[in-house]
Amino acid sequence: MSNPSNLKYTASHEWARTEADGTISIGITQHAQELLGDMVFVETPAVGRKVKAKEEVAVVESVKAAADVYAPVSGEVTAVNSELDSAPEAINADPYAAWMFRMKPDNAADVAALMDAAAYQAIVDSEAH
Amino acid sequence: MPFIPHTEQDIAAMLASIGATNIDELFDEIPAALKSSKLTAIGDGLNEMQVARLMHERAALDNQPLNFIGAGAYEHHIPAAVWEIATRGEYYTAYTPYQAEASQGTLQTLYEYQTMIASLTGMDASNASLYDGASGLAEAILMAVRSHKSSRRVLLPSTVSPLYRSVAQSIVKLQGIELEEIHFCAETGNIVPESLDSHFARGDVAAVIIPQPNFFGALEDVDALTDKTHAHGALAIALVNPLSLALLKAPGQWGNKGADIAVGDGQPLGAPLSSGGPYFGFMSCKQALVRQMPGRIIGRTVDLDGKPGFTLTLQAREQHIRRAKATSNICSNQGLMVAATTIHMALLGSDGLRRAAAASHANTQALAVQAGGVQGVKRLFGTPHFHEVVLHLPESSARVLDSMAGQGISGGFDLQPHYPQLGNAILVCATETKTGEDIQRFVAALRHALH
């Protein structure tokens, strides 16, 4: 599965998608879900929480690991995907459909400044060594 | 699984491989000022014969007085079969095995233990035990604060054991958690639910500790306390004597929604007093909090062939996976004590536990009535109790207990140093192990000590 070109990426393996209302949806990448393995639990943040870029916002737990999910940009949490409560495996099935939380960014420019798919792929490739 | 120590040659080879000349060099980072030099208070080694002699001498000092002290550690009858089975080679370790799933019998025992604790406390899930009741209380506080997120204030009644409060304070104080003391009513020895109001008025509270029975043996109004706690968005932590739950309402049924976490010392369920340990702590909680619960959890599953089996579960909370963000640094549990408790509860059954609890209550009631007949002695707090009561003496409690000790009786726990406002008060306990004659001996010794 390649990384969709319409998304933005972080070096800590989150993806961000700008929605029509200006909020961004955030999930973890194909590479991240492959490394973590079968997901068993997602701990989502409280709606309304204000977070800074690179702050820990959510936690994903797989059968073999737990990993923090970081805010790609500063902003406020506006929604969480409660469907993942009962079906965390959706992240394994399609990581780019399984968003975890939405944020209203403080600055839209911060989102634009995130990596594109090619830049992110270069990081994944370099980690493979 | 054998223990294979490193040989001198192994150690030398490993040091050579990393370019160190001795083991001390690995600790160079620690400033010299922080290192203690020779441990001068530690004597020379003793051989087996010398150790055996020393232990016999020490054991002889404990001249097995007739014991009426409870205060957190209780003398109960333990059927001989309990430790006969628990000390079998298959059980005889304090640990869950490192290759846990290879030891299905141990895991099944722990799973059954968890089932019993969850059932006794009326909770959804139990861990496989903690070190003891006091550190278990600290773990429950840490768990509540993690889960509450917005507050680090916890209300801790002074009717919780002073030793537990001290341990909890030591563990949580450096984590920015504030334990606020709730004073008890001098007349009843209870926490008045309304006394929490002023604390809630000052801002968010993460949790309230609710002891049942409390340190004085008295029963708290757990329903009202739990409901008040929940009404203010805090978690209710039930600190309970597990044996009392054979008679009293399970924490899971307290108030409208039930307590959120139940914790306590498991010693009354099959662990001998043995000069203070080892005991173990138990902890159970509601499903919603299970990922915040520290310690190991055993789950039941099926293998590839569909056969039932037991496995460690929810390990992502634990330090070998979650590292610094683990729910606790508790990596082990009190496996041996838990094996004994599981066997003890299985042998007694719910009816046996109920009878032991009821006899302990009745004996303490008889003791309170008869001791109250001694001139100058009166029972404090007329509140309903489980198996401990507070007696007020007309003279120095320390001196009276000393005199009773001279008559071969451990007459009670001196409350004076911990609760000076109560005056010459002692906490007494008569479990099912005490006979009517024992109680008469207590009363006679008390009378002799006073006159």
Image (cartoon, coloured by chain):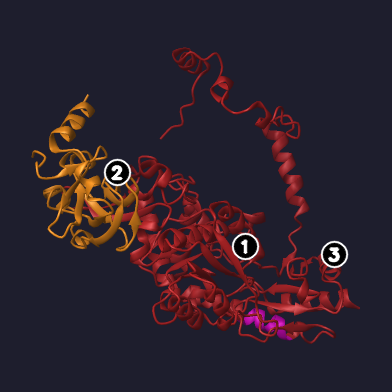
**Chain A: drawing colour:** orange
Q: Which label belongs to residue B165?
A: 1
> What is the chain letter for disc 2?
A
Find the magenta span and give its range: B362-369
Residues B93 and B35: in front is B35
Residues A3 and B183: in front is A3
What type of secondary structure mainly makes up the magenta span? helix
Mark 3 Cα within 10 Å, few/some/many (few <14, many 20+)? few
Mark 1 Cα within 10 Å, few/some/many (few <14, many 20+)? many
Q: Which label belongs to residue B406?
A: 3
Name which residue lies at 57% across and 23% down: B28
Name which residue lies at 11% across and 49% down: A94
Q: Secondary structure at mark 2?
A: loop
Work out whether mark 1 precedes mark 3 in sequence or the reverse, and give the earlier one.
1
**Amino acid under disc 1:** Arg
Residue B57 pos. (x, y %): 77, 45
Mark 2 Cα within 10 Å, few/some/many (few <14, many 20+)? many
Q: Residue beneath label 2, please? A: A65
Which chain, by letter, is red? B
Please name which of the two marks, 3 or 2, marks the residue nearer to the observer: 2
- The C terminus of chain B: image quadrant: bottom right
> What is the chain letter for disc 1?
B
- The N terminus of chain B: image quadrant: top left
Q: CA distance from mark 3 to mark 2?
A: 60 Å
Q: Secondary structure at mark 1?
A: helix
> What is the chain letter for disc 3?
B
Q: Is residue B286 above or below residue B83?
A: below
Horizontal relation, residue B340 to residue B171: left or right: left
Q: Secondary structure at mark 3?
A: helix
